[in-house]
Amino acid sequence: MVECETLVQYCDELLDAQGYRDYCPNGLQVQGRSQIQRLITGVTACQALLDEAITRQADAVLVHHGYFWKGEDQRIVGIRHKRLATLLDAGINLLAYHLPLDYHQELGNNAQLAKRLGILPQGRFGPADAPELGWSGELPQACEATQLADRLHSVLDREPLLIQVHERPIRYIGWCTGAAQGLIEPAAMAGLDAFISGEVSEQTVHIARELGINYFAAGHHATERYGVMALGEFLAGQYGLEHEFVDIDNPV
Ligand SMILES: [Zn+2]
């Protein structure tokens, strides 16, 4: 059992919650009861996750994609009303960490994806105004593009979209979880053999072909399960909480 205030303060410091120019507030987004014993984690604070949290008598829900995004309709109506009413009626706290959970050196989405795929992280890359966004690293053994696709499939339990544009073995890889398809250009400029992101756009395919870099779209949801999962496990160990990651299926 831990005070909600203590837990939030701990997470904020651990993840450097105030250190990012993000598209949403990071930290406690919706206040609930003051004591936390049962923690549910998930990728997105959708209604299905909240319903599961109630079934499992959670005191707090911790997610990567929370609420109050920049540019979003600010009115509390429709599905936004239903989600907030669900949390407030049940007294469940909602904690959300977006960019801080992508970036974190050990618990973050990119670090966790590398760990699962067996890539050794070596550096960062990105556009001139955000050079730290993408991660780059090396596979212990070079492989074929189709072998890496199979590995992604088995690790993430989701078949990736492979855009294969060269036959060279893959050794040096760039990756960035979520909607990071825009990083394919800096990945190619960094001389990497392949780039993995979550989402893909129509134009990503042409860029891959024209810059000669193999590309894998491994799923936004699928690539962003592991940061919040690792953070939940870590917090459970730290404070003796009951923790469960709930996977609400999302093919995108
Ligand atoms: Zn995301």
Image (cartoon, rainbow, N blue to C red):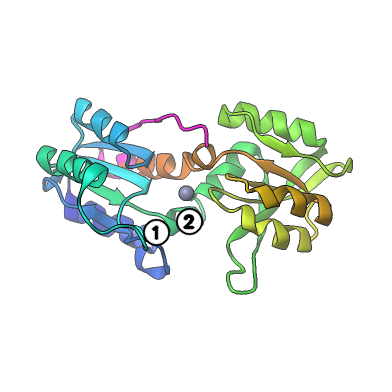
Can residue 116 be found in the magenta stretch?
Answer: no
Left or right: 117, with 173 as reference point:
left
For the point 68% across and 36% down, which residue is it? 161
Q: Would residue 78 appear left or right of 208 to someone viewing this image?
A: left
At 75% from the left edge and 54% from the top edge, which residue is drawn?
Answer: 207
Task: Specify the quadrant of the image occupied by residue 215.
Answer: top right
Point 51% across, 47% down: residue: 109
- Counting from the top left corner in percent of width and height, residue 164 is at 80, 40
Q: Secondary structure at mark 2?
A: loop
Q: Is mark 2 within 8 Å of ligand 1?
A: no
Tell me if mark 1 has few (under 14), some (14-19) or many (20+) residues whose alpha carbon lies within 10 angstroms of its own. Answer: many
Number of numbered labels in the structure image? 2
Q: Secondary structure at mark 1?
A: helix
Reading the image, the residue beneath label 2 is: 104
- Give the answer, above or below, for where 248 lies relative to 220: above
Q: Is residue 123 left or right of residue 2?
A: right
The one of 163 and 31 positioned closer to us in this rendering: 163
